[in-house]
Image: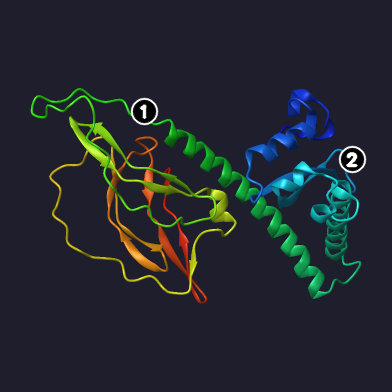
Amino acid sequence: VNRPCNCYGRLKDESCWGEGGYEGFLRRLKEQWPEESICRVQHMAPHPENPRAQWLLPIKKPCKCFGDLQNRKCWGEGGYEGHVRSVEKRYKKLYLESKARRGGKIKVSDADRAEAEAAVKAMELERRRAEAARRYEILRKRETAVSLKTEPANDDHKLPAKPPPPKKELKPDSPSKNAKWIPGYWHRTGGRWHWISGWWRVPQTDVSAGLTVKTNVPPPPRRRKKMRRRSRAVAGLVWIPGHWHWHRGKYIWIPGHYRVPPSPHHIWRPPRWRRVPGGAVFVPGAWVLP
């Protein structure tokens, strides 16, 4: 939730939060996200010592909880306000203990030290997740806005005005909880029609939250089949190498195909399977800037 810092001190200001103030913003947040998704917001809290400073404390809950701030099942006793007070109290305690430890006034147990370090790491992880989600949203909008304008056909390739019928292709199982299937389509470039195969668009939030496919079977070795060298690259398209995909309880090979990049400056980061104890986790591919 990216808003100017002074907005968090004016929760009813519609110029900051839109119609209905902060409460209206939370209602719209619920409408934008599915109920089963996890929403992460940052709560503005006063600094325990410096009156001019503010804390941004991370709050992570199912999105449906932000639509009912009095739901005890989501927030516990006292609803949202009670949960916020407990979060402020916890971080204030960790801050004071950390300050006292640095000053040598008190000795902190290993358990408290580990808790304080974990809290700091959690705040840094939330910041990185928010930044990754923001960058992914920018890339997603750019990819969606890619124009499919056709180029004039060359004399050697007189193409019909309409593309050929769509190809029948396999729709593999979803690689994550909130992935969206993008069907294949014909794309005209360089005086030819090129088939852009369908693919799964995986939200960065699914990757950060560990919602991608996990298997207890390690993936097969990557195929090293020798392919006939292409005479030239296709203008405006990028060749995506094939990869292993988990489908109906087994691995299947997704052949290489062309895809339209969000911009000429983007490069493709291929998907991979990350080994973990007891199996492997799928890390989807993505367009990235070098």
Q: Which one is nearer the viewer's eye here, 272 or 77?
A: 77
Of badges 1 and 2, the one in the foreground is 1
The colour scheme of the drawn protein is rainbow
Outermost residue, left direction? 156
- SS for callout 1: loop
Residue 1 visible in the picture = no
Q: Earlier in the sequence, mark 1 or mark 2?
A: 2
- Return the x and y of residue 50 as percentages of the image width and height: 88, 44
Residue at the spot x=64%, y=51% of the render? 36
Tell me: 261 left or right of 45: left
* Mark 1: few/some/many CA within 10 Å (<14, 14-19, 20+): few
- SS for callout 2: loop
Q: How many marks?
A: 2
Residue at the spot x=28%, y=56% of the render? 255
Outermost residue, bottom direction? 278
Residue identified by numbered label 1: 147
Q: Is residue 88 above or below residue 213?
A: above
- Return the x and y of residue 126 as percentages of the image width and height: 66, 51
Q: Quadrant of residue 167?
A: top left
Distance of mark 1 from mark 2, alpha carbons? 51 Å
Residue at the spot x=79%, y=27% of the render? 20
- Return the x and y of residue 34 as percentages of the image width and height: 63, 45
Residue identified by numbered label 2: 51
